[in-house]
Each structure stands twice: as structure tokens, then as C-alpha cells.
Amino acid sequence: MKFENKPLPGGSSRSIDLLVPEIRDAAKKHLSLCSENGIVLLIYCTVRDEWEQARLFRQNRPLPLIEAKAVSLRKKGFPRLAEILMEVGPQGGDYGPRVTKAGPGESAHQHAVAYDCVPLRFGKPVWGASRPEDAKLWKKVQTLGVKAGLEILSWERPHFEVKGFNQNLLEYMRERYE
């Protein structure tokens, strides 16, 4: 799968048209399968730029963890991504929950091969899965995503991505950022 190395919109987008064709087709299939099963699915994030990813990574992390990620990015050969991470702020404090493990350049969203979604019930997003009916709904959404050809992450319920992204992360990063 070849990523079209074109500029990303500033911040993030929810347009599935910005996804690479294979993922765009899988997203459409996922939406269709959900609809056929009576589930309304909202895709709320497809692609995001490196600065937005850096802000999300920094959310509720202390400065030493942010600095460690920047060192890791430099060691992998991506000094500009390390700079972005250190420049965006804020860090530390209580800025909400940690929502990603991926630093700038490390998210499938920067490579247009992922999207985040949430099922709606009576027009309202169902974010959690602590109630049995919510857990059942999310399980169905995930099962249908896998049926559409996507991979799910155990630690990030709303996220669907191309199969094998994490195993090929450095290849994706080198293609886009070197």
C-alpha cells in the first residue's frame, strides 16, 4: 500500500476521502456493515498532522516522558518529529486522559491508513463500554471492522487501521519523513 505523500490538513480531518484507497474502501464497507446491523457509526477522525499528534501524545504526560519520546525519535533518525514534539506544548498537569501511545509520525493517522469512530445511540456517542449493552455494541462494531478487513487495537477501542501497520511502522515513517 503506497501512501500518497501529500500535505495533511492542518490539525485533523474526518473526511474518509483523505484515506488511502484500500482503507477508504474498508471504511465504507465498515459503515455499510454497521448500517446493515442497525448501528449508526460516526467516523470522527481520519488523518491528522504531526503537530496534532504531538499535542495528543503530550496530553497528561510529564516532561521526562515527553523528552524520552523525543530522544527515541531522534535515535530512529527523525529529528524534525522530535522538534515538533518538544515545540507544541502543553505537557504535564491534568489535561485529560492519555489517548494515544503514538508520538508524531508514529500514528497510522499521519499515513492516512486509520480512522477513529464511535457508535451512536439515539444520536449520542457511546464512548464507554462499562455497561453490558455498551460493551455488546462496541464488540459488534469491532467485529464488523475486522470483517471489513481492518485491524483493531486492544488499547484503543475507537481506532481501526490497516493490517500490519505497527509491524511496518519504521517503513511508513521513512517513506514519509526521510
Image (cartoon, rainbow, N blue to C red):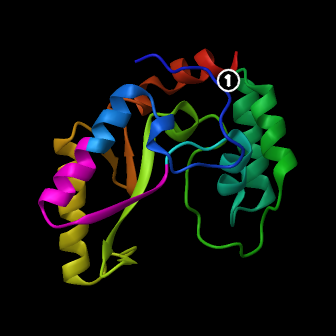
Residue 119 shows up from this direction = yes
**Label 1 amino acid?**
Lys
Identify the image quadrant of the C terminus. top right
Give the vertical position of 13 relative to 136 (above or below).
above
Q: Position of residue 169 (x, y in %)?
A: 50, 27
Give the vertical position of 23 relative to 128 (above or below).
above
**Pointer 1: what residue?**
76
Identify the image quadrant of the N terminus. top left
Residue 156 shows up from this direction = no
Element type at mark 1: loop
Say whether residue 53 is left or right of residue 68: left
Say whether residue 36 is left or right of residue 13: left
Give the vertical position of 178 relative to 163 (above or below).
above
Q: Residue at x 36, y 34 (%)?
A: 23
Is residue 36 located in the magenta-colored stretch of the structure?
yes
Is residue 22 located in the magenta-colored stretch of the structure?
no
For residue 113, which quarter of the picture? top left
Residue placed furthest toward the right: 87
For residue 37, which quarter of the picture? bottom left
Q: Residue at x 34, y 27 (%)?
A: 22
Q: Which residue is drawn at 45% across and 23% down?
A: 168
Say whether residue 15 is left or right of residue 33: right
Q: Which residue is drawn at 75% across and 62% down?
A: 62
Q: Give the range drawn in magenta.
A: 29-45
Q: Position of residue 110 (x, y in %)?
A: 58, 36
Q: Position of residue 174 (x, y in %)?
A: 61, 17
How many marks can you see?
Answer: 1
For label 1, count other residues whose C-alpha is less than 10 Å away and answer few (under 14), some (14-19) or many (20+). Answer: few
Say whether residue 44 is left or right of residue 106: left
